[in-house]
Structures are given as structure tokens and as C-alpha cells.
């Protein structure tokens, strides 16, 4: 990935890079951390699950159990009690960065874009 990214003057990399992306950290100029409060995030996930699978996520449906397990796992992000990605783990990763960090917490798209543009100078 480093070879691909270094062949460009500017690039954007999206996702949770905690751990696997650490070799790329020295090349970061800006990190944008997007956080959506749990209640908003879970509601969005439930809507997305229904859009994807329809009535199959309802009791008796083939996706009922997997969908509930996914929502439960996603709800655990804030506490960090489940394995994998978590807010405490991401906060710790952010503490180790030396580049600028923009935190976007449930802002409108326009406000989020403004924050990033302002950070870029």
C-alpha cells in the first residue's frame, strides 16, 4: 500500500487503520476521526439492515439472529468490551499521532466538510 500511496502527491485513506496501518502513520498530514453517538449509529444500522434484508431481519426471518448479533456487536463499540474496533482502542491510537486531528462528532455534512477544509488550511 505504501508504494501505491507514495506514487501520489496527495491521497486520502479511509477506514480504521489501528494496528495494520501503523507503518503509514508517519505519512499522515491530517487524520479525520468521525464519531456518531451510539443511539444515532444504532438507529442508522437498523435502518440499513432493513433496507438490505427487509422482513428477513424480523422474528422468524432468516436474518433475524445474524442481524441482532451484528447490532449487539456494533453497540459495544463505545465500551470496548467486545473484541475488535472500539472507541477506547481508537482513542488510544489517536493519542499516539503527531499530525493534526479533526474530530467530527455527528455534525451535518456541510459542517463536517468545513471542519476538514479549515484544518487543511
Image (cartoon, rainbow, N blue to C red):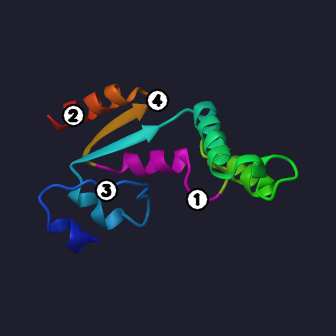
Q: Quadrant of the N terminus?
A: bottom left
Asked if the residue under mark 3 is in contact with the one under mark 1, i.e. CB atoms within 8 Å, the reply is no
Judged by depth in the image, the label closer to the viewer, 1 or 3, is 3
Q: Position of residue 30 (x, y in %)?
A: 25, 45
- The residue identified by callout 1 is 84
Question: Is residue 110 on the magenta stretch?
Answer: no
Counting from the top left corner in percent of width and height, residue 113 is at 29, 32
Mark 1 or 4: in front is 4
Quarter of the image holding residue 33?
top left
Dot 3 alpha-carbon crowd within 10 angstroms: few under 14, some 14 to 19, many 20 or more = few
- Whole-percent x, y for residue 43 in the image: 64, 35
**Residue on which disc 2 sits:** 117
- How far apart, in angstroms, are the residues tagged by discs 2 and 3? 16 Å
Which badge, 1 or 2, comes first in the chain's sequence? 1
Tell me which segment is drawn in magenta.
83-97
Marking on residue 13: 3
Q: Residues within 10 Å of mark 4 (few under 14, many from 20)?
A: some
Which label was assigned to residue 106?
A: 4
Packing grade of label 2 (10 A; few <14, some 14-19, many >=20) is few
Let me know if residue 22 appears in the view: yes
Q: Residue at x 76, y 56 (%)?
A: 63
Amino acid at each position: 500500500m505504501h508504494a501505491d500511496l507514495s506514487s501520489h502527491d496527495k491521497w486520502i485513506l479511509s477506514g480504521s487503520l489501528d494496528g495494520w496501518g501503523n507503518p503509514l502513520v508517519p505519512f499522515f498530514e491530517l487524520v479525520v476521526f468521525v464519531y456518531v453517538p451510539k443511539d444515532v449509529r444504532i438507529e442508522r444500522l437498523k435502518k440499513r439492515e432493513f433496507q438490505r434484508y427487509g422482513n428477513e431481519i424480523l422474528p422468524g426471518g432468516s436474518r433475524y439472529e445474524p442481524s441482532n448479533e451484528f447490532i449487539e456487536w456494533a453497540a459495544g463499540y463505545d465500551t470496548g468490551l467486545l473484541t475488535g474496533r472500539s472507541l477506547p482502542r481508537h482513542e488510544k491510537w489517536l493519542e499516539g499521532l503527531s499530525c493534526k486531528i479533526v474530530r467530527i462528532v455527528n455534525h451535518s455534512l456541510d459542517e463536517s466538510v468545513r471542519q476538514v477544509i479549515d484544518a487543511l488550511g
